[in-house]
Structures are given as C-alpha cells and as structure tokens.
Image: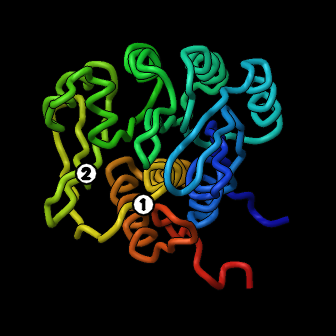
C-alpha cells in the first residue's frame, strides 16, 4: 500500500464554470500532492463573467457531508470558501470543534470575481467576530478586507489593524489597483509583517482567491511552516495565472494543473 496523501476538507460553493469554488480547490490540492475532500456549501449560477444567483445548502446536508469525511478520513487541514449565510458560519464552528488542532484556512468569499455578492453583509461580520477565532489564517483580497473591517476606503494596513485582534495571521492580497507590482502582505498578531511582491499580469482572473487559499491549506497539511507555506502558495498561484486560459467570454481561469497531468 502506498502512503496516503494528506487530506484537506474543503467547504466551498460549486461553480458550474469550473473556474472557482470546489473545482479550483480540487485542482490546486492535487497539484500540491494532497487529497481534496469537497463538501458543498452552496450552489451558484455563474459563469466566467459574473454570478447571477446562489443558494446556500441546508445546514443538515452540509454537516452530514463533512461528518462522513471526518469519521472516515484523517483530515490534516480545512479550507473554507463560500459560506453564504451566518447559519453556515455556525455549521463550520460546530465541525471545527471535532477537529482540534487542525489548521483552518479561511478564504472569506464575499464577492465573485465579477463583483456580484455571494452573501449578505452580516456574513462578513460573523466571520470576523466568531469564525476568525478558530481560523489559523484568513486570506481576503483588499475589497473583502474592507468589508470584514467595515472600512469602505481603508488601506490594507488599516484593515489589518482592525482585524488582527480577531485572528493570528491575515494575508491581504493585492492586485486591485493599477500598480506595476502586486503587493501581498502577511500580517501577524505579534506585530511582524511579511511582504511578498510579484509582477502584475494582464487581464482579470476567475478563481485566483480559491486557488491561493486551497494551496495554502495543502501546504499546511503537508507540514510546511506558515510563512513558508504562504510564499509557496503565492508563488504557485502566480504561475497558474501566468499560464491562465480564457475558455469563455469573461475572466481568465488559472491553469492549476499541467497540460500533461492526465497522461
């Protein structure tokens, strides 16, 4: 019998375009040498342009999916994507009580890449006030960090100052301005900060945040130290964007697996 790959429990929404959500999680985790255990939290109607509608699944269905995984597989990390309701925040808290010491990467999916909402404003508040306490790290982009911090025009530093009392590590990703280099900043509750820069790529991308968060969860599941895991996840995500393709009418989709992966 071969050695089993680390298992990452993913609680995310389903994107029928295949660019974001659970498919992004699965592909990114495969690329890290991990096994993805996908638990569906929500169904969406979206394409590579934007999201048109979504439906959060019944809490009991989500609990049943995740509990079946937890009872059977040795979960080494958990990755959160779209939750969509405060009830789903409660669901995650209940599940994490069964996984003491397991790292949790929280990707606060509050907006689709095209700008459409994927949850009401109180979901961001519930994440900040209750979910961050059991999370290892959160990975918002700057627009999401502003929603979480309730600072509509806040800088990354200002948002971090508001959010760090609730979580130990906060990675705020850049790329939403017109600067030539993208600045991604890891803020630590102890006051230290790590800056990671990369060249800006042309175009816009569907599923980059999901790719980053799931990759980070995979690196932590493999036992990589947090700061190093953040760098590994950012480097991998940048490469998937560099090699992205545009299969539809909207944003580019990251190429998370090499073309010869299935050969």
Count of numbered circles in the view: 2
Compared with residue 61, is residue 234 higher up or lower down, i.e. above or below? Answer: below
Q: Position of residue 237 (x, y in %)?
A: 42, 63
Residue 220 spot, x, y in % from top left: 49, 48
Q: Which residue is mark 2?
A: 176
Secondary element type, mark 1: loop
**Alpha carbon of mark 1 to alpha carbon of mark 2: how far?**
11 Å
The circle drawn on residue 25 is: none
Q: Identify the residue at horizontal 54%, vertical 38% (top origin).
A: 81
Picture residue at 34% right of the left edge, 35% below the top = 144
Q: Quadrant of the C terminus?
A: bottom right
Q: Residue at x 21, y 22 (%)?
A: 162
Check the picture and name the quadrant holding the N terminus: bottom right
Q: Earlier in the sequence, mark 1 or mark 2?
A: 2
**Residue 223 visible here:** no
- Whether tag 1 and tag 2 are in contact, CB under 8 A, the answer is no
Residue carrying label 1: 205
Q: Quadrant of residue 102?
A: top right
Color style of the picture: rainbow
Tag 1: Cα neighbours inside 10 Å, few (<14), some, or many (≥20)?
many
């Amino acid at each position: 019998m071969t050695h089993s790959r680390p298992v990452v429990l993913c609680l995310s929404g389903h994107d029928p375009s295949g660019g974001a959500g659970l498919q992004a999680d699965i592909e990114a985790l495969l690329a890290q040498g991990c096994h993805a255990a996908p638990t569906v939290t929500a169904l969406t109607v979206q394409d590579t342009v934007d999201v048109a509608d979504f439906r959060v699944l019944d809490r009991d269905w989500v609990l049943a999916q995740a509990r079946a995984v937890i009872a059977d597989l040795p979960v080494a990390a958990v990755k959160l994507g779209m939750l969509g309701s405060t009830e789903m925040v409660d669901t995650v808290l209940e599940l994490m009580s069964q996984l003491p010491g397991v790292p949790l990467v929280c990707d606060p999916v509050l907006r689709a890449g095209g700008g459409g909402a994927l949850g009401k404003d109180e979901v961001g508040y519930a994440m900040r006030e209750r979910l961050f306490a059991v999370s290892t790290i959160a990975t918002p982009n700057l627009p999401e960090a502003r929603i979480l911090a309730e600072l509509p025009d806040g800088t990354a530093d200002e948002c971090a100052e508001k959010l760090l009392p609730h979580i130990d590590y906060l990675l705020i990703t850049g790329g939403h301005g017109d600067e030539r280099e993208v600045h991604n900043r890891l803020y630590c509750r102890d006051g230290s900060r790590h800056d990671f820069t990369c060249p800006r790529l042309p175009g816009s991308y569907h599923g980059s945040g999901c790719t980053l968060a799931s990759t980070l969860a995979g690196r932590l599941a493999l036992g990589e130290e947090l700061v190093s895991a953040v760098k590994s996840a950012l480097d991998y995500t940048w490469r998937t964007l560099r090699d992205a393709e545009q299969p539809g009418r909207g944003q580019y989709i990251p190429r998370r697996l090499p073309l010869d992966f299935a050969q």
